[in-house]
């Protein structure tokens, strides 16, 4: 083996330690090497499973002992409808909407399956616990567990429960390197059918140890919530000036705070 080949191999190996992207995989004839092809197929299967695995509200409720929860569904009757009709995933089932409690609350947390029930099952309860522990005298509504739900369903929930702010924790669209990524979407004074993605703030890639940690996400989220309450708005006019946490996984740069979905 030539010195150039050895150096090139070492370079690719070093680069792969810094990212989850599939780089420098080489080839076997005109195809990928068998090992990398099998890894790609396994990642694709994990992504499909994340999208189609059923939501288990009991898993979330068990991770929130002593916290009252409410279960709702979107207007999408089943998973196929949810995938084909995004608009229905943004609206509450009318029967479930009528049974939501109302109260003098500052914020409601909505845990929604989104496109990865796996992400929600593994991370959502821990993020709720870590965030609410930082909120002091905030009046927090019962946690809403939403099935077949998209981000904008939180607007409908907040309107029905008469809360000033909503945080939607939702399973993000799985990719070929992550099928368990959780997103947190913050919206102040949401209005169903009127609020747009520009009116929200998002923390993406919550999934320790390879993404943002629970404490890191909670710190950023609680900070944004406090400033949102002071300003009376979220979205493009609310910026994150929190110091970025050092991510402990293979990606050296932490996730950006987004204002889109």
Image: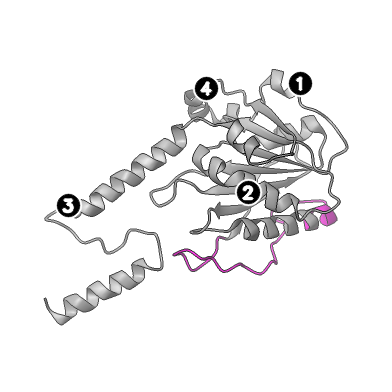
Q: Quadrant of residue 86?
A: top right
Residue 34 is covered by the magenta coloring:
no
Of the two numbered discs 3 and 2 on the same chain, state the one appearing first in sequence: 3
Q: Position of residue 73 (x, y in %)?
A: 63, 25
Residue at the farthest bottom position: 3
The residue at 59%/26% (across/down) is: 88
Give residue 237's mark: none
Q: What's drawn in magenta, residue-wise?
A: 227-255
Q: Is residue 234 visible?
A: no
Neighbour class for label 3 at 10 Å: few (<14), some, many (≥20)? Answer: few
Of the two numbered discs 1 and 3 on the same chain, state the one appearing first in sequence: 3
Q: Position of residue 211 (x, y in %)?
A: 52, 58
- Give how far apart the Cα atoms at labels 1 and 2 are: 29 Å
Give residue 126's mark: 2
Label 2 residue SS: helix
Give residue 78's mark: 4
Q: Position of residue 20 (x, y in %)?
A: 39, 60
- Give how far apart the Cα atoms at labels 3 and 2 are: 42 Å
Of the two numbered discs 1 and 4 on the same chain, state the one appearing first in sequence: 4
The residue at 70%/61% (across/down) is: 239
Quadrant in the picture for the N terminus = bottom left
Label 4 residue SS: loop
* Closer to the camera in the image, 127 or 222: 127
Pointer 3 residue: 31
- Give how far apart the Cα atoms at labels 3 and 4 are: 39 Å
Q: How is the image coloured?
A: one colour
Give residue 98's mark: 1
């Amino acid at each position: 083996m030539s010195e150039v080949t050895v150096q090139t191999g070492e370079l690719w190996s070093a680069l792969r330690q810094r990212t989850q992207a599939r780089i420098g995989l080489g080839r076997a004839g005109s195809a990928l090497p068998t090992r990398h092809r099998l890894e790609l197929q396994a990642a694709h299967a994990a992504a499909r499973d994340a999208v189609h695995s059923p939501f288990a509200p009991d898993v979330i409720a068990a991770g929130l002992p002593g916290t009252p929860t409410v279960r709702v569904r979107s207007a999408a009757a089943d998973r196929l409808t949810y995938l084909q009709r995004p608009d229905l995933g943004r609206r509450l089932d009318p029967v479930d909407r009528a049974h939501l409690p109302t109260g003098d609350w500052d914020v409601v947390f909505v845990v929604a399956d989104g496109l990865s029930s796996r992400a929600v099952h593994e991370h959502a309860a821990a993020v709720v616990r870590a965030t609410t522990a930082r909120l002091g005298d905030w009046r927090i509504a019962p946690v809403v567990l939403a099935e077949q739900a998209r981000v904008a369903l939180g607007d409908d929930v907040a309107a029905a429960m008469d809360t000033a702010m909503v945080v939607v924790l939702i399973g993000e669209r799985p990719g070929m390197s992550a099928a368990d990524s959780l997103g947190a979407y913050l919206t102040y004074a949401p209005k169903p059918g009127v609020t747009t993605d520009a009116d929200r703030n998002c923390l993406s890639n919550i999934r320790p140890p390879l993404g943002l940690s629970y404490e890191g996400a909670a710190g950023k989220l609680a900070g944004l919530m406090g400033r949102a309450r002071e300003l009376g708005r979220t979205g493009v006019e609310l910026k994150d000036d929190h110091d970025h946490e050092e991510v402990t996984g293979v990606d050296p740069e932490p996730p950006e705070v987004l204002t889109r979905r």
